[in-house]
Amino acid sequence: MISQFTEKIFFYCLPQGTPDKAAYQHGIVCLAEGLKSLGIQFYSNQNYWKTSPEKEEYIFCHDSSVTPDDCSIVVLNDLWFRYGKPFPENLFHSKRKYITVYIELWKESNFALNPEFENFDLVLKAQCNSRLKYPSNCHPWAFGLSKRILQETAILPSFQERKKHLLVNFRVGHSVRQIVGKKFLPRIQSILPIDNSSDSFDTFPTSPYDYLQWNQTGRRHYPNYYKRLRESVACACFGGVLQPSWTRDAVAPTKLWYRILSKLDLRPTQLVKWESWRFWEALAAGCVPFHLDYQKYGADLPVIPENWRHYIGIDLDNIQESIDRIADEPELLERISTEGRLWALKYYSPIPTAQRFLEKIGFSIA
């Protein structure tokens, strides 16, 4: 439990949108679920994230009597700015007593690198790379697990009951996925046949609860998808972009000189924009996630998973070595299935996420 924390937290939330533009604020949802479990009070500028289709109950609740100045921490997230909202009026006023926090998850967002975001006391940014230089207030963060994901993966079959195949269901054509599609997938399917089953964006669930979650997550909630995760041994969770290793500037990919010089660089590469919903969903389901080797390519998290213990990280320079190891160690996938799930629950379910958030701000944990 959190000791010596009896203060309030204020969140700025966007309203719930339509399924195709839902403004799904996953980062603050996970955080709020953890804070609520810890008994910590928080408020918001409006009601957001309905908890049940039957009741008008929300995890974020607006109280007109509570303003940011009544709270000790004020939190914004990247969708606030992606949807065109300006900084809240007087957010950084000189007499404020609250700590300002900005959470950035989406790969399309890069606001954290803009000079005005250095005004935040703390920036928590997903998609970080340990070899890149970020502003001093910027720290690595992660997508993590929400109660919705945990509910869908609470009851699992034994590993022996799972289908021995690799789920592959990419919607967006990241360059890493294109590389993996050419170099890795054709070689792995001899020992892990590929299942390309997918769900149409427009095929919505019929139960009231599942439809609510499909709507709120911007069409990211499909019961059949979670069923496939629960029943499969492994899932391809690759994503991101590889960039040359010479740059240390997190802003560099947007610059012309980066695009020119990158064509000449032949040294090992580093991974950016790499976070994957599937990675966390697969971990929770005990479905072994495949991604690139986080350590080799510099993917950074608050707590980094161990390759070949919590997930399988592929080295693109030694693909056959990974395939041979999977073939030679029949018990390997089952072990990673168990240990990867336990690791994710220990460090990235809502309560540890909330505890880490408060530790970052400087509040002690008993």
Image (tube, grey):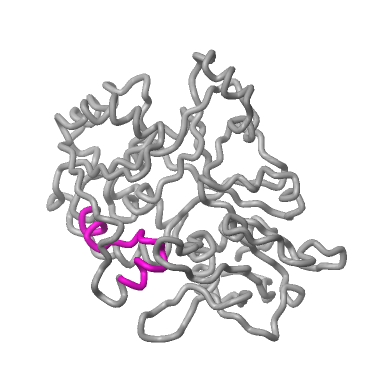
The reply to whether the magenta stretch includes residue 212 is yes
- Magenta segment, prevailing SS (helix, strand or loop): helix
Q: Is residue 195 left or right of residue 263?
A: left
Q: Is residue 116 left or right of residue 78?
A: right
Quadrant containing the C terminus is bottom right
Quadrant containing the N terminus is bottom right
- x and y percentages locating residue 108 in the rendered image: 52, 46
Q: Nearer the viewer, residue 30 or 110?
A: 110
- x and y percentages locating residue 55 in the rendered image: 40, 86
- x and y percentages locating residue 340 in the rendered image: 35, 48
* The image quarter in which residue 89 lies: bottom right
Q: Is residue 337 left or right of residue 345?
A: left
The reply to whether the magenta stretch includes residue 14 is no
Q: Nearer the viewer, residue 197 or 146?
A: 197
For the point 33% across and 48% down, the residue is 339
Count every numbered label the image shows and give the total: 0
**Residue 4 vertical placement versus 62 (above, below):** above
For the point 83% across and 64% down, the residue is 93
Give the residues in magenta.
211-228
Q: Nearer the viewer, residue 322 or 170?
A: 170
**Residue 353 vertical placement versus 17 (above, below):** above
**Residue 285 vertical placement versus 154 (above, below):** above
Q: Nearer the viewer, residue 342 or 153?
A: 153
- x and y percentages locating residue 220 in the rendered image: 36, 59
For the point 36% across and 61% down, the residue is 219
Q: Residue furthest right?
A: 94
For the point 23% across and 44% down, the residue is 167
